[in-house]
Image (spheres, rainbow, N blue to C red):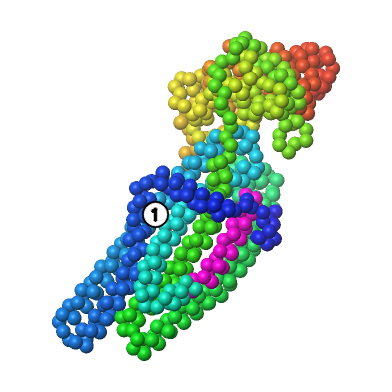
C-alpha cells in the first residue's frame, strides 16, 4: 500500500553532480542532433530570431511615440511621415515575431515526436540486449519503467528548455543593452525581481523528482489493480469469487493516499510561489513608479518612459523565464540521468562465435552445474550432472521449485552456471554463437507466451518472426496438434488472437498450448526439443496423440508432472530442491522405491480405485 510520509523522505536514485549534469545535457543534445540535424538547426535559427525581436519592437515603439509627439508639436509633414515609417516598422517587427513564434511551435512539435521515437527506440534496443537475469532484476525493471515512462517527454523537455533558456538569455542581453544605456540600476532591479521565484522553483525541482520517483511502486500497484478490474484474464475469478468491491476499495484507498500526498506537495509549492510572486511584483512596481516619477519631472520623454516600462517588464519576464528554464533543466536532468543509467547497463557478453562443437556425437551434458538466483539462500540447482546423447529422450521430474525450469534456462543459454558447465557436442555453451545455439534447440517454455498477434505470428515467433512459407507454418501446426484449430479460426493463420481488437478471436488454454508447441516445432534444424509441461492443458486424447508421435531422431527433454508421459524415456532424472536425487529408466526408478516410485504410485492409485 502507498506510503503517506513526506515526499522528501522517499529514496530515489541520486541526482547527477554538476559535471555529470553537463555531460548528460550534452549527450541529450547529441541524441537530438543525430535524430534530426535540419530540425535542430532550424529551431536554433528561429530561436535567435525570436530572441532579438522583442527589444527591437520596444525600441521602435519609443521612436513611434516620440515621433507622434514631435509631429503633433511641429505639424511638419516630414515629422508626420517619419512617425508613420516607425509605426510601420514596429508593426512589421511584431508580425515577424508572431510568425516566427508560430513556426517555432510547429517545428518543436515535430522534434518532440521524432525525439520521443528515437529515445524510445534506444530504450527498447537496450532492453532487447539485456540478459534474462538483468530483465528479471527488480532494480533494472524500475530503471526501465522510469525510462519508458518519460522517454517522450523528459529528453525533449530538456532540449526545449535549453533552447528557451538561450532565447531568454539573448533577449535579456538585448534588453540589458537598452536599459544599461539609461540606468544600470534598472537592469540590476530586473535581475533582483526574478530571483525569488527562481529560488522557490529550484527548491521544488528536487522535491518533485524525489516524490514522483519514490512512489513508482505505488503507481505500478494502481495500474495492476486497474488491470484486475478491467481485463478479461482476471474477470472469471473476480466475478466468481466476488472480490471486485474489495479491489475497488483498495484502488480508492491507494488513490486517496497518492492524491493526498500529491495535493500536499502542490499546496506547499503554490503558497510559496504566490508569496514569492508578490515579492517579485513589488520589485517591478517600484521600478515602474520611479520611471513614471522621472518622466513627470521631465528627465525623459514619453517614448523613453514607454520603452523603459516595457523593457523593465520584458526583462523581468526574461529573468523569470530564464531561471524557470534553468529549474526545469535541473529537474529534467534528474530523469535523464536515469535514461543514461539504462543506456550504460552492461549488455550480455555474446562473444562466443562457435557454430559447432568438437564432438558432434556427444550430445548435451551437465557437469556439476550449480546456479543460484540473487538474494536466494538455497541454490536453484546444486551440482547437477547428466548426459543426453543425440536421439535420446530425457524425462525430468520434480515438485514445483525443484529447479526444472531453471535447468531449461541453462540449456538454452539464457543463464550461465555459477559453477560447473553445460556443453553441447563437447563445447561449453558460453562459447557457442547464440544464433547457432538457438538453431539447435526447439523450445516450449513454461509458462509459454500467448502473443496477441495473428496465429501465423504466434507460430513464426519460433524463428524470430521471420517470413516463413505457409507450408512450413502449417507443418509446424500439424506437429503441435494445432492444424485443426487453425482451420476453425475465422481468418485462418491471419486471425488476430485477442479480444482486445474488434476482429480478434480468443482461445482456450489448451489451444494456446498447441500454438506454443507448434512454435517449438517450427525450427526444423533443431535436433534437441525441450518441452516444459507440454500437455498440461491438453485433453486426454490430444495428450495420447502427442506422446505417441515419432520424433525423427531428435533428442527430447520432457518435463512433466504426469509421470505416465515419461514411461518411454531413455532416462529420467528426479530433482528435489535443486539436487539430482534419482536417475534411471521408469522401471528402474519404480523398482528403486524412492521419490519417483512414490509419485508414480500416488498418480496410479485413483485409476486403480476406478
Vertical comparison of 381 with 83: above or below: above
Residue at the spot 15% in from the left edge and 82% down from the top edge: 77
Q: Position of residue 505 (x, y in %)?
A: 52, 36
Residue at the spot 63% in from the left edge and 66% down from the top edge: 264
Residue that extends furthest to the right in the rendered view of this protein: 593
Asked whether, in this view, residue 355 is left or right of residue 4, the answer is left
Taking the magenta stretch, the answer to whether it contains residue 215 is yes
Q: Which of 89 and 562 is in front in this view?
A: 89
Residue 402 visible in image: no
Residue that extends furthest to the left in the rendered view of this protein: 77
Residue that extends furthest to the bottom in the rendered view of this protein: 297
The residue wearing badge 1 is: 108
> What range is drawn magenta here?
193-220
Asked whether, in this view, residue 319 is left or right of residue 237, the answer is left
Vertical comparison of 168 with 73: above or below: above
Q: Residues within 10 Å of mark 1 (few under 14, many from 20)?
A: some
Amino acid at each position: 500500500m502507498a506510503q503517506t510520509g513526506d515526499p522528501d523522505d522517499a529514496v530515489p536514485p541520486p541526482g547527477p553532480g554538476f559535471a555529470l549534469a553537463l555531460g548528460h545535457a550534452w549527450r541529450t543534445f547529441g541524441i537530438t542532433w543525430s535524430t534530426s540535424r535540419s530540425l535542430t538547426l532550424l529551431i536554433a535559427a528561429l530561436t535567435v530570431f525570436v530572441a532579438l525581436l522583442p527589444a527591437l519592437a520596444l525600441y521602435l515603439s519609443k521612436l513611434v511615440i516620440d515621433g507622434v509627439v514631435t509631429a503633433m508639436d511641429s505639424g511638419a509633414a516630414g515629422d508626420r511621415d517619419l512617425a508613420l515609417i516607425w509605426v510601420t516598422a514596429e508593426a512589421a517587427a511584431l508580425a515577424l515575431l508572431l510568425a516566427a513564434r508560430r513556426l517555432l511551435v510547429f517545428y518543436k512539435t515535430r522534434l518532440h515526436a521524432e525525439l520521443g521515437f528515437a529515445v524510445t527506440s534506444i530504450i527498447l534496443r537496450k532492453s532487447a540486449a539485456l540478459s534474462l537475469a538483468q530483465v528479471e532484476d527488480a532494480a533494472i525493471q524500475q530503471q526501465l519503467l522510469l525510462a519508458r515512462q518519460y522517454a517522450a517527454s523528459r529528453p525533449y523537455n530538456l532540449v526545449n528548455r535549453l533552447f528557451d533558456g538561450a532565447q531568454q538569455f539573448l533577449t535579456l542581453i538585448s534588453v540589458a543593452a537598452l536599459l544599461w544605456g539609461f540606468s544600470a540600476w534598472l537592469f540590476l532591479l530586473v535581475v533582483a525581481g526574478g530571483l525569488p521565484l527562481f529560488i522557490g522553483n529550484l527548491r521544488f525541482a528536487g522535491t518533485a523528482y524525489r516524490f514522483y520517483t519514490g512512489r513508482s511502486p505505488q503507481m505500478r500497484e494502481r495500474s495492476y489493480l486497474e488491470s484486475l478490474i478491467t481485463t478479461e484474464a482476471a474477470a472469471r475469478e473476480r466475478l466468481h469469487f466476488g472480490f471486485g468491491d474489495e479491489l475497488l476499495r483498495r484502488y480508492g484507498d491507494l488513490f486517496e493516499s497518492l492524491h493526498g500526498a500529491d495535493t500536499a506537495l502542490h499546496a506547499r509549492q503554490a503558497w510559496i510561489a504566490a508569496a514569492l510572486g508578490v515579492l517579485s511584483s513589488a520589485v517591478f512596481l517600484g521600478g515602474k513608479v520611479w520611471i513614471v516619477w522621472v518622466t513627470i519631472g521631465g528627465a525623459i520623454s514619453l517614448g523613453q518612459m514607454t520603452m523603459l516600462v516595457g523593457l523593465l517588464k520584458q526583462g523581468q519576464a526574461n529573468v523569470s523565464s530564464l531561471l524557470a528554464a534553468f529549474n526545469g533543466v535541473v529537474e529534467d536532468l534528474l530523469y535523464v540521468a536515469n535514461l543514461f543509467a539504462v543506456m550504460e547497463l552492461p549488455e550480455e557478453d555474446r562473444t562466443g562465435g562457435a557454430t559447432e562443437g568438437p564432438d558432434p556425437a556427444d550430445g548435451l551434458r551437465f557437469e556439476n552445474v550449480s546456479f543460484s538466483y540473487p538474494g536466494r539462500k538455497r541454490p536453484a540447482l546444486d551440482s547437477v550432472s547428466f548426459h543426453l546423447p543425440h536421439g535420446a529422450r530425457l524425462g525430468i521430474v520434480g515438485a514445483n521449485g525443484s529447479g526444472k525450469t531453471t535447468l531449461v534456462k541453462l540449456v538454452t543459454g539464457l543463464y550461465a552456471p555459477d559453477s560447473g558447465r553445460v556443453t553441447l557436442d563437447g563445447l561449453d555453451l558460453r562459447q557457442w554463437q547464440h544464433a547457432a545455439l538457438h538453431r539447435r534447440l526447439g523450445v516450449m517454455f513454461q509458462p509459454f507466451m500467448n502473443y496477441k498477434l495473428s496465429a501465423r505470428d504466434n507460430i513464426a515467433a519460433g524463428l524470430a518472426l521471420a517470413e516463413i512459407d505457409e507450408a512450413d507454418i502449417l507443418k509446424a501446426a500439424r506437429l503441435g496438434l494445432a492444424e485443426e484449430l487453425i482451420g476453425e479460426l475465422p481468418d485462418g493463420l491471419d486471425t488476430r488472437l485477442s479480444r482486445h481488437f474488434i476482429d480478434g478471436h480468443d482461445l482456450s488454454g489448451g489451444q494456446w498450448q498447441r500454438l506454443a508447441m507448434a512454435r517449438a516445432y517450427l525450427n526444423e534444424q533443431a535436433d534437441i526439443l525441450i518441452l516444459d509441461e507440454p500437455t498440461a492443458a491438453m485433453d486426454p486424447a490430444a495428450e495420447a496423440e502427442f506422446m505417441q508421435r515419432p520424433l525423427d531422431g531428435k533428442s527430447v527433454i520432457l518435463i512433466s508432472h504426469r509421470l505416465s508421459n515419461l514411461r518411454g524415456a531413455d532416462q529420467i532424472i528426479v530433482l528435489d530442491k535443486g539436487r539430482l536425487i534419482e536417475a534411471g529408466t521408469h522401471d528402474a526408478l519404480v523398482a528403486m522405491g524412492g521419490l519417483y516410485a512414490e509419485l508414480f504410485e500416488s498418480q496410479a492409485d485413483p485409476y486403480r480405485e476406478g
